[in-house]
Structure formats: structure tokens, C-alpha cells
């Protein structure tokens, strides 16, 4: 359920918006779509992400690098080394490049291979005990977004656990609104995600919901979610292009 827009540094203020409705409950402040340097389009280092996430009040984050869970494991392990695991819970996730477009899996145990159909990808995520989230379903400026026919088939089959009804990187607000309409049509919980690829984007979007430790607990908490978010500047997409280019140059120089 949408709440007033937030800034990237005011996560802790969101508690006031849901305290009355969830009185007596421990709250999580979560972001479910984050990329670090283990994605080809991000150079965000684990240490910098962890510092900013804690400074900005996040308590639960799903690290969802493209087609690997190793990047999420790297953040989880670094948080443990820093002795911060009680304050910042890291969820192993992945943004999977299915044959039908991108699908996010969270609470994974191993990498889901790219190239499977949307239905096969969702089944593989659920087989690991994970949850299936659909990122930026109607953003036409990303060729990687899921195609509508497979998306509707997943929704009709009950294979979607949450839909990104707000993605901070979506260029035009109406495409987030279409995602909200889809979630409402099928009664699927909505989430807001920063789609972080760089430091300034950390906590641009946040979900305030009952605290959770497991996939089942998160599934039960999602219908009570209150999401908050702001869109990133359009210029933020230059950071991903620079990341891709700089990594290509480094690979070339390393040969």
C-alpha cells in the first residue's frame, strides 16, 4: 500500500507511518532489489553498500545481482565479518534473466540458471523454498523486462509472491502505476524497490512490514506491507553504463 514519498536518508521516519497499524509488532525496513559489483552494471562494493544501508536505516535487504547468488553471499559474509548480522539481515537473491524476461528470486540457496522460461524459473525458485518477485514489469525502456503474456500466465497460475509496484529507476511514473494495477487485479502483494546500482540509490525505496527471518514469514508479512519510495534521477542510468564500460575496459586491459 502506497505511503508518502521518501528520501534516501529518511528510512527511520517511515516507522511513524505504520506504528499505529502494526502496534506491538517488530518492524523490518526492507529493500528487495539491490545490485553490487557482482552485477556487470554496478561497481558498488560490499563495504560501501553495508555502510550506507545501516546509516539509512535498512534492516533487511535482498542482494539480487544478475544471474548469480555469489554476490549476495559476499555481502552476507562481509556483514558477518563486521559483526553486523543482527542489525542488517542479508537475503540471498538473484535477478534471473529468464527466456521471457527478468524475474527476481529471494531466499535462494544456489544460482538459478538463466535462459529458462518464466514458468520454469518461478518453479526453480519455489523449489529452493524461495519467493518469486516480478521487477519493473512495464518499463519499456528496459528490454529485459518480462513480457506480458508470460507475466499474466504466472499471475493466473498463482506463481508470483510479490510485484514491484514501485521501482525507483522506472523512468515514467505511469509504468509503476500499471504494475500497481496488475497487482490489484490479481490480489498480489506490492513492494517498492530501489533497484540500487550505486551509492546514492541506497534506500531510495523501502518496505515497512512485520519483521521476518524466513521466506514463509516474509510471505505472511507481505500483505501488511507499507511501501515508500521516490524515483531516481534519470541521470542515474549513466552510472550503470559507466559500470559496464569500465568493467569492459578492465577486462580488455587484463588480457
Image: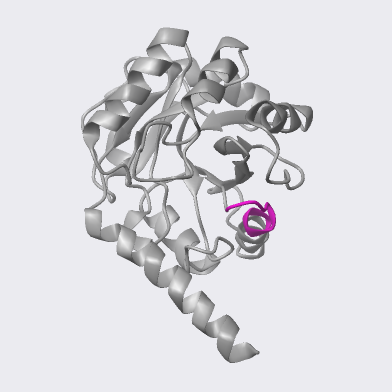
For the N terminus, the image quarter is: top left
Q: Is residue 227 left or right of residue 163?
A: left
Q: Can residue 2 be found in the magenta stretch?
A: no
Q: Position of residue 184 (x, y in %)?
A: 39, 12
Placement of 65 over or under 198, stated as above or below: above
Q: Can residue 71 be found in the magenta stretch?
A: yes
Residue 168: tell me if it is visible: yes
- Residue 131: quarter of image: top right
Q: Position of residue 171 (x, y in %)?
A: 26, 44
What residue is rendered at 77% in x and 33% in y? Answer: 128
For the C terminus, the image quarter is: bottom right
What residue is rendered at 62% in x and 37% in y? Answer: 106
Q: Position of residue 212 (x, y in %)?
A: 58, 29
Q: Position of residue 64 (x, y in %)?
A: 57, 48
Residue 19: tell me if it is visible: no
What residue is rendered at 63% in x and 39% in y? Answer: 99
Nearer to me, 176 or 16: 176
The magenta segment is: 66-73
Nearer to me, 112 or 28: 112
> How many marks on residues?
0
Q: Is residue 92 left or right of residue 14?
A: right
Placement of 249 over or under 68, stated as above or below: below
What residue is rendered at 58% in x and 35% in y? Answer: 100
Placement of 229 over or under 227, stated as above or below: below
Color theme of the render:
one colour
Amino acid at each position: 500500500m502506497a505511503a508518502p514519498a521518501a528520501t534516501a536518508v529518511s528510512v527511520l521516519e517511515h516507522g511513524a507511518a505504520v506504528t499505529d497499524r502494526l502496534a506491538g509488532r517488530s518492524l523490518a525496513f526492507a529493500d528487495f532489489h539491490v545490485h553490487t559489483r557482482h552485477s556487470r552494471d554496478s561497481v558498488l562494493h560490499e563495504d560501501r553498500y553495508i555502510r550506507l544501508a545501516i546509516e539509512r536505516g535498512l534492516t533487511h535487504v535482498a542482494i539480487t545481482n544478475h544471474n548469480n547468488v555469489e554476490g549476495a553471499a559476499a555481502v552476507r559474509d562481509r556483514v558477518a565479518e563486521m559483526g553486523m548480522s543482527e542489525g542488517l539481515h542479508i537475503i540471498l537473491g538473484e535477478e534471473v534473466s529468464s527466456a521471457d524476461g527478468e524475474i527476481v528470486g529471494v531466499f535462494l540457496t544456489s544460482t538459478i540458471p538463466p535462459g529458462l522460461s518464466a514458468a520454469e524459473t518461478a518453479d526453480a525458485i519455489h523449489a529452493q523454498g524461495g519467493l518469486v518477485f516480478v521487477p519493473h514489469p512495464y518499463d519499456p525502456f528496459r528490454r529485459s523486462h518480462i513480457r506480458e503474456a508470460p507475466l499474466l500466465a504466472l499471475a493466473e497460475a498463482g506463481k508470483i509472491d510479490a510485484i514491484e509496484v514501485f521501482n525507483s529507476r522506472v523512468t515514467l511514473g505511469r509504468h509503476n502505476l500499471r504494475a500497481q494495477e496488475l497487482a490489484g487485479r490479481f490480489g498480489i502483494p506490492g513492494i517498492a524497490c530501489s533497484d540500487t546500482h550505486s551509492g546514492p540509490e541506497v534506500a531510495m525505496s523501502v518496505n515497512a512490514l512485520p519483521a521476518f527471518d524466513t521466506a514463509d514469514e516474509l510471505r505472511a508479512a507481505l500483505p501488511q506491507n507499507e511501501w515508500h519510495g521516490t524515483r531516481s534521477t534519470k541521470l542515474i542510468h549513466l552510472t550503470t553504463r559507466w559500470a559496464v564500460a569500465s568493467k569492459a575496459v578492465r577486462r580488455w586491459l587484463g588480457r
